[in-house]
Each structure stands twice: as C-alpha cells, then as structure tokens.
Image: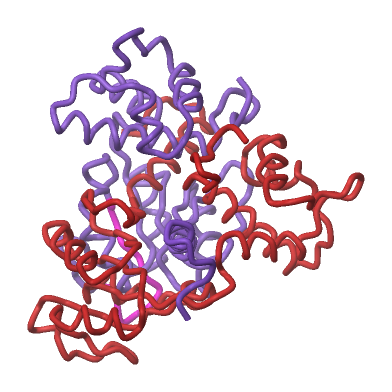
Chain colours: A red, B purple
Amino acid sequence: MSGEHEKGGRLSLLTVNRLSLYLRRLEALEAEGIETVSSAQLAQHLGITDAQVRKDLAALGHLGYPGVGYYPRELIEVLRDTLGLQGEWPVVLIGAGNLARALLKYRGFGQRGFHIVCVFDADPAKIGEKIDQWTVLAMDRLAEQVAAYRAQLAIVAVPASAAQAVADALVACGIKGILNFAPTVLRVPAGVHVVAVDLAMQLEQLAYLVRTQTGTDSPPD
Amino acid sequence: MSGEHEKGGRLSLLTVNRLSLYLRRLEALEAEGIETVSSAQLAQHLGITDAQVRKDLAALGHLGYPGVGYYPRELIEVLRDTLGLQGEWPVVLIGAGNLARALLKYRGFGQRGFHIVCVFDADPAKIGEKIDQWTVLAMDRLAEQVAAYRAQLAIVAVPASAAQAVADALVACGIKGILNFAPTVLRVPAGVHVVAVDLAMQLEQLAYLVRTQTGTDSPPD
C-alpha cells in the first residue's frame, strides 16, 4: 500500500476523509434507490481519479464486481465498520456561546452516533443555564462527568484565548480526541488527537473553485 | 499529472485541501521563525507521503532546493497566489440564528480576505435586528445587495428545510459559490459550486483516529 497510508496500517486523515465522502455519497445513492455504482461515478462525484477510488476501496476487501461495480448497501456497511460508526460515542462540549448553541441543535451528530452528553462553560453567568435538555456545568465538574460517561471525545467551542487551557483540562481528564473550533493551534501530548474545523479554509476552497471556473484570476474587487 | 487532478488542469477539491493544509503549516512555521522545511517534515505533519508532498509542490513550480528543502516564505506566497487568496472577497450570509451569529464573530474569515458584507433572514422577527455592525435584511433585498457588492460567495446557515429555496435564490442572483452548513444536499446548476461543511464527518474522522490509536475496536458503550 503506497500513497497516503501511515506506517502501521492505520489510514491517514486524508484517506479517512475520502472514506467519509464515499460513505456520504453511497448513502445518498441508496436513498435514491440506486442499486449499483461504478468507481468512475464515485470518482467523478468527488473530483478524483478512478484509480484512487479503486485503490481506496480495494484496501477494504473484495468489494467490486466486474461488469457491475459496487453495491452501495454492502459498501456502506464496510465503510461504517472501517470508520467505527456502528456504535455510540458520548461527547462533551466545552463552551456555551453561539457556536455551542448551534452545535447542540445540529441534528447531524446524533444521526452518526455522536451524543453531546454535557456542556461546560467557564463563565459564571452561564453556569446553571438550561439550553434545551442540557444544563451548563462549571469546568470543575469536567473530570467527574468525563469519567461518568466514559467520554473520549470533546468539542472545543470557546474563544481562541481560552482554548489551550481547555485542551489541557480535557487531556488531564483522559479525553483522547478534540474537535477544535477555536481559530488557534492546540498543543496536546502524543496519543491525543485534534481535528481542527477551519471554516476559513473551506471558504478558500470554494473561492478557488469559483475563481478557476469563471476564468477570472482575482476576486472582483 | 496523474492522481487527483481534474481534466483541464484545474486542481481537484482534495488537492486544494492539501494546498490549504500546507499553507496553514507553513504559516505556523514562519511565525515560529523556521527558515527552511523539508517535504518529509510537511508530510509527517499531514500524515501523507513525502512523494505526495513533492508532487503537489512540484506542480506549482521549481520551489524545492536540493539539500535545503523549501523556504516557507516563498512557498506561502506561491500557495496564496495559487489559491487566489491575495485579494478580498465579499460574502453574503443567509441566516441570522446561533450559527450565523457565531460566524459573524469568527475572526478567521477576515484574516483570509473574506468579508461578510450582509446578513439576510426570512424571519420577520429578525429583520432589522442589529448584530454588531450588521443589520439583518429581508430576503427580498438579496439581489440588490449581491449586485451592489459584486458578491460571488454566500454562506448558507439556515435550517435544512429552508436551504434549497435559499440556494435557488442565491443562484438566481448570480452567486457562484455556496458554503453550506445546512445538513442537506443542495442541488445547483453547473457552474455553481457548493462546499458542504459536514461537522459530523469531522467528528467521524476524530473518532477513527481515537479508536485506532487506543486499540479498542468499538466506542466505550
């Protein structure tokens, strides 16, 4: 296996990203009642090569059928299994501002087995506040709640200035994965993972597509 | 050029994603005063192969120096130029709920040249409301404002049930790129681009890393 695989057989984040994208696409196809799909169709939808799709999916087992392609339902099961999506994950949320409130209402998490079990904030004015079924807890309750729910994942939705201290507290409680919305780089020890949600990066990618499509070589102003 | 390049020389979204990640890393290195970096160091940071990094960067020009590596400052300029980040982009925001408010406060956009110029909402109770320097406008002002600012980009931060109608209105006004936060697939005509912000997908990727790292094969419960 060459390309984007880390040593030790674990897939790289970019490979996992592609598997997630295949899964989304296959779920959409299955919902439309499509019974077979080719690597070329998947490749075209994602804007990557056929060869990359076939290689990624071959690494998961013998899933392609000559002259037929792939069966979405079968592939969905294998991808969910590979990505570890067959279970339920308790998640703690740090921050109770606008972004956190939006995340609490975001239905996509629950559909994927991710359940926000507690919300924490450092602001005394927010502690005790009810947001739907959640009550905002003080940060000194973090360790107890992480242990009680056996949570391994946390979402950090606090200002950049507070994010590193929050990450340190999460690591101290045994959290192993942090989804970071704060626009700052978090330093964590080996064995703890951070995925940064960089919203500006996604706008950059969109701007690139628009700019190259329209043939202009600069923004309008 | 093989791999993830679309025909016609335009880079695929996944390639653009890697270029954005290189840019972020190089900016961090430059801020730390690091004067040279190797493809191996960039590759290790992103969890991809050396060969992929060298191939991606070779496509941008002769930027690597034997025995030295890359100069972050030089590479940053080339990447910003390739990604079209040297200018300013006006962006319209649709939705004035919690997520939209969080986006209005998000400082990362302005740092990258993206400026939210107007905020729109369909809810009469929100129209006219002041949010920092913005006043929420009615949807029937959309065409006029998009034209006035010559905006090509829009952010959709409305509930899933409203998102397609909003996308249709944006397309009718001439918007060419939509950053979609609504957990639904938007249908747009050819020539209009949608980048979906799928927050659950990013949690999935984090869960994968945590699960494979810790050697458990299922979530804790």
Q: Pick whichever, B158 or A105, lies toward us.
A: A105
Q: Is residue A182 above or below residue A206?
A: below
Q: Pick whichever, A147 or B116, lies toward us.
A: A147
Quarter-of-image position of residue A177: bottom left
Q: How many marks?
A: 0
As for residue B184 lying within the magenta part, the answer is no
B132 left or right, relative to B59: left
* Residue B167 percent coordinates (x, y): 52, 60
Magenta residues (range): B116-128
Q: Residue at x 73, y 59 (%)?
A: A75
Q: Residue at x 63, y 37 (%)?
A: A48
Q: Pick whichever, B200 or B65, lies toward us.
A: B65
A145 left or right, relative to A209: left
* Residue B124 percent coordinates (x, y): 35, 80
Q: Pick whichever, A205 or A143, lies toward us.
A: A143
* Residue A196 percent coordinates (x, y): 33, 53
As for residue B120 lying within the magenta part, the answer is yes
A185 left or right, relative to A57: left
Quarter-of-image position of residue A179: bottom left
* Residue A167 percent coordinates (x, y): 21, 62
Q: Residue at x 43, y 56 (%)?
A: B213
Q: Quadrant of the C terminus of chain A?
A: top left
Q: Is residue B78 above or below residue B153?
A: above
Q: Quadrant of the N terminus of chain A?
A: top right
Q: Residue at x 29, y 32 (%)?
A: B87
Residue reaching furthest to the right: A67
